[in-house]
Amino acid sequence: MKTITFATLKGGSGKTMNTFNIAGILAESHKVLLIDVDPQCNLSANCGIDTGDAQLLTVRDIFGNLSENQPKPEEVIFKSPIADLPNLDIIPSSIMLFDTEMNMINVAGRENFLKYYFEDYREYLENNYDYILIDTNPSMSIININAFYVADSIILTSDVSTNSISGAELFCALWNSKRKPLRKENNIAALILCNRDKRANLGNELIEYSSSAEFSKDLVLKTVVPSTVKLKNTEVEHQPVNLLYPKDEIKKVYDNVVSELKERGVL
Ligand SMILES: Nc1ncnc2c1ncn2[C@@H]1O[C@H](COP(=O)(O)OP(=O)(O)O)[C@@H](O)[C@H]1O
Ligand SMILES: [Mg+2]
């Protein structure tokens, strides 16, 4: 079982898009658990989950019940939200995660709760999943730090724009300073460039920059995900690219992303 967290410090940089579509491809041949820790709940929505449902157990029930009444994985995991991908499960997020975070501020060991949860239920998780993919929001919140800390690998995402690449660079600097006191090894393992609009002149320069900049040169994938309305449609249709466009070029792009990540040992 491998745990991978998607991260950067800029919103709208393709974290959720990449998490969703990589998960879709992996779930064709592996058992995949998604965990959505972004209170905006975009990944949960992509999977067609109604996060307004008051009965729904979410990741908030894990972080909000630190010592007792924590739901077991089989209680909080929403099984197969996408009918045609039965191997894909999700722990949804909740808009109320914001106030959960407030309650964690003064609790000892607050960076480790997700790790403890994984340890408590290791046997269940290892028996049921090959991959756990976690989607975060652009911040160094305590809940996100839990997701970075528990990860075997962190995948950075950036669209092909100066501000977005700066967000990835800033993430590396901040996580490196946070992880050292926590005795966590450097787990930043890849950078996916995405949402590239061929009409934008700066594109090539930024791709070259990320292939040579100190923070990213060993991380950046050769495959760059283009900007296409087909990817926007995956969100609307609640179907990742391999279900919605199985024969399209954009599906091959994501196949290449997955292959490169496997070659690097990230997946
Ligand atoms: N390759 C792409 N082609 C077209 N639109 C994209 C692409 N990647 C992301 N988007 C759009 O950009 C927006 C932000 O992407 P998202 O993955 O939600 O970013 P993040 O999770 O980092 O905030 C979304 O509305 C999505 O539809
Ligand atoms: Mg997102």
Image (tube, helix red, strand yellow):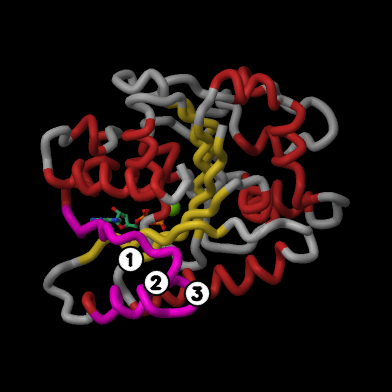
Q: Residue at x 70, y 51 (%)?
A: 101
Q: What residue is disc 1 on?
A: 159
Q: Amino acid at mark 2?
A: Ser
Q: Residue at x 39, y 47 (%)?
A: 263
Give whichever of discs 1 and 3 has the lower sequence position. Answer: 1
Task: Tell me which segment is drawn in magenta.
Answer: 205-228
Q: Position of residue 19 (x, y in %)?
A: 41, 45
Q: Is residue 2 covered in magenta?
A: no
Q: What residue is disc 2 on?
A: 164
Q: Residue at x 60, y 74 (%)?
A: 173
Gap in Å between the C-alphas at discs 1 and 2?
6 Å
Gap in Å between the C-alphas at discs 1 and 3?
16 Å
SS of the residue under disc 2 = helix
The answer to the question of whether label 1 and label 2 lie on touching residues, with beta carbons closer than 8 A, is yes
Q: Is mark 1 within 8 Å of ligand 1?
A: yes
Q: Nearer the viewer, residue 180 or 11?
A: 180
Q: Amino acid at mark 3?
A: Phe
User: For the residue carrying disc 2, how many other residues have a C-alpha within 10 Å: few (<14), some (14-19), or many (20+)?
Assistant: many
- With respect to residue 4, does 74 lie above or below? above
Q: What residue is disc 3 on?
A: 215
Give whichever of discs 3 and 2 has the lower sequence position. Answer: 2
Q: Nearer the viewer, residue 49 or 243?
A: 243
SS of the residue under disc 1 = strand
Q: Amino acid at mark 1?
A: Asp
The quadrant of the picture showing ligand 1 is bottom left
Left or right side of 217 for 120: right
- Count every numbered label the image shows and give the total: 3
The answer to the question of whether label 1 and label 3 lie on touching residues, with beta carbons closer than 8 A, is no
Give whichever of discs 1 and 2 has the lower sequence position. Answer: 1
